Image (cartoon, grey):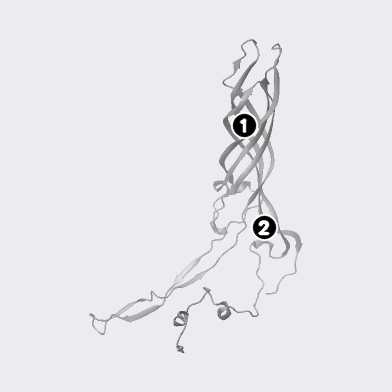
Amino acid sequence: MTNDHHHDHHDHHPTHKRNCVDVDVSANIGECESVRVRPYTADITRHLTISAPAVLAERRVTTNLVAEIHFPDPVLEIKDIKKRVQIVQCSLMLPALAPDQYPPEDDFLVPLFLKGFVRKNIQYATPCHHPSGKCVASDLRSLTVNIPFHCTTTIPLGEFIIEPEFPRVSPRTEFDFFRAQDLGHGFPEKDQLLSSDLSQFHQVSSQFYNHLPFCELVSHNITEWDEAIDRKKHEHDTFEGTFYTVVEKMSLQFTIRVLQNQQIPIGKLLPCDND
């Protein structure tokens, strides 16, 4: 005998959905309205403009490094060192300020955080056995090391080539509605709870997508001293010797260019708007 009243257990939950949002019901595809918006930068409202990276500043940064380098082989002498500066972080920390909140240019310092390393490829000679014992034979090898640095500097507002566009804050504002509710058992019938409704939430929010400043590396200059601290002379040679460790003192100077995508006027005035 069959049971004509058999139902799947999912039928007891008609509100059960596989998706969090029923797009077939809530989504709307229709005509959208649009109106003209004036550019955020006030002084270009009547000029032809382009959106392009603007050079905010070029800075010559100087920092000093000290490192101890250990070689895997005995080093007879260093033949050459090739160096390359690599920047991994360059962050201009612009505060969120409205134009009427700008402090005096000489007193307003914008921090610039820098992080990177100097990649060094050290070519060196390491001694090897010579049958005659009357000369020093050697093999040429190389060692690649990264010397890190992390520093911060500041840029006065008055030293920017073009003033940066400061980030606009994304506001969120909540609001509520008054509601009178019965207090229930234990309170006089005439008394009510006067407050807002906790079961509802109302908010107006805006989001601005600001342009993040970025950097380019222009040039670098390095002055270095590499000095062995554990050099030992050979037993049968007065002048020759080997070492494993050098202490490096490095004065690093590099030029960094700070840019930001902006709307830039290109000179030609547009006709005046009557509106």
Q: Position of residue 250 (x, y in %)?
A: 61, 30
Q: Residue at x 58, y 79 (%)?
A: 24
For residue 262, which numbered disc appears in the image? Answer: 2
Q: Is residue 250 left or right of residue 200?
A: right
Q: Position of residue 92 (x, y in %)?
A: 59, 49
Q: Residue at x 63, y 36 (%)?
A: 118
For residue 206, which numbered disc appears in the image? Answer: none
Q: Is residue 18 above or below residue 70?
A: below
Crowding near the residue tagged with mark 1, few <14, some 14–19, many ≥20 C-alpha atoms within 10 Å: some
Badge 2 element: strand
Q: Is residue 262 above or below residue 10?
A: above
Quadrant assignment for the N terminus: bottom left
Q: Residue at x 49, y 66 (%)?
A: 172
Quadrant assignment for the C terminus: bottom right
In the displayed orientation, state which residue is furthest to the front.
Answer: 1
Identity of the amino acid at label 2? Gln
Q: Position of residue 45 (x, y in %)?
A: 68, 65
Q: Mark 1 or mark 2: which is in front?
A: 1
Crowding near the residue tagged with mark 2, few <14, some 14–19, many ≥20 C-alpha atoms within 10 Å: some
Badge 1 element: strand
* Residue in the foreground of this view, choosing between 87 and 20: 20
Do the CB atoms of the residues marked 1 and 2 lie less than 8 Å apart? no
Q: Is residue 243 above or below residue 192?
A: above
Reading the chain from its start, which is encountered first: label 1 or label 2? 1
Identity of the amino acid at label 1? Ser
* Residue in the foreground of this view, choosing between 264 and 103: 264
| Residue pointed to by mark 1 | 251
Q: Position of residue 114 (x, y in %)?
A: 59, 43
